[in-house]
Amino acid sequence: MEGMTTETGTETLDRDVRLYIFRQAAETAHLPRASEIAAALGRSQPEIEESIQRLAAGHALILAPGTANVWVADPFCAVPSNFRVSALGRTYWGICIWDALGIPAALHSDATVTARCGDCDQEIVLDVRDGELATGEGIVHFSVPAAKWWDNIAFT
Amino acid sequence: MLIFRSEEHIDRWCASRELTRGAAMSPEQCWQLAQAWYANVLRPDWRRKTLDEADATLASIGLTGPFWSLRA
């Protein structure tokens, strides 16, 4: 076994939990609670909650402030926002324009992203068709330098 | 990160919040960034990019310079 890396039980659990959350997000446009994940994976809820905390600490997902609930499994956001994505007959939400475009990138699907101008709130629509940005008006602005994105990931 | 109708709208938004203007990109660049970042997120073997990989990804779509460096 020399030279080979072996995955620990914790790493396997975290991989399975992450994958379940992201695939549920993709397939249902819904981010599952710990109890749902526990039932699906046949594990205890405390085990799943600990795994979610590790995944959040590793920036694999973002928890709702002060809770153990997944708020964002980037690019999928659990709650409605100013960045709505219509794809595969479902409605998804992103926390920012990057994530909103990340949804058709993750799904490998066509999508219509309906966002709002950060200044005047006017609707801005971007269409992804056949892997290309078919229509893309507007301009994207990052307020925070990349090195500081994780200081406050809700404001970048 | 937000999207705006034009550069003028970015400037007005920054001024109204007394924020220093950051950096802007086209929607096409943002789409390329989204693909580079999220295309494999549903795969079992997904892992976070290393700093080197992330910096290289940003550079590959023309996002270079101190603003886009992930190193503090």
Image: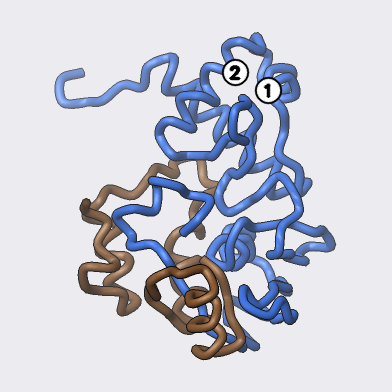
Chain colours: A blue, B brown
Q: Which mark is residue A34?
A: 1
**Which residue is pictured at 27% across the width and 56% down the height?**
B70
Counting other residues with Cα less than 10 Å from the Cα at mark 2, is it few (<14), some (14-19), or many (20 or more)?
A: many
**Which residue is pictured at 68% across the width and 18% down the height?**
A38
* Chain identity of mark 2: A
Q: Which mark is residue A48?
A: 2
Residue A128 seen by the camera: no
Q: Amino acid at mark 2?
A: Ile
Counting other residues with Cα less than 10 Å from the Cα at mark 1, is it few (<14), some (14-19), or many (20 or more)?
A: many
Q: Position of residue B6 (x, y in %)?
A: 55, 89
Instruction: Check the image and report above or below for B50 versus B35.
Output: above
Say which element carries label 1: helix
Q: Position of residue A120 (x, y in %)?
A: 68, 80
Instruction: Check the image and report above or below for B56 versus B48.
Output: below
Between the C-alphas of marks 2 and 1, the distance is 6 Å
Pick the residue in front: A62 or A111.
A62
Q: Is residue A121 left or right of residue B10?
A: right
Q: Position of residue A74 (x, y in %)?
A: 55, 49
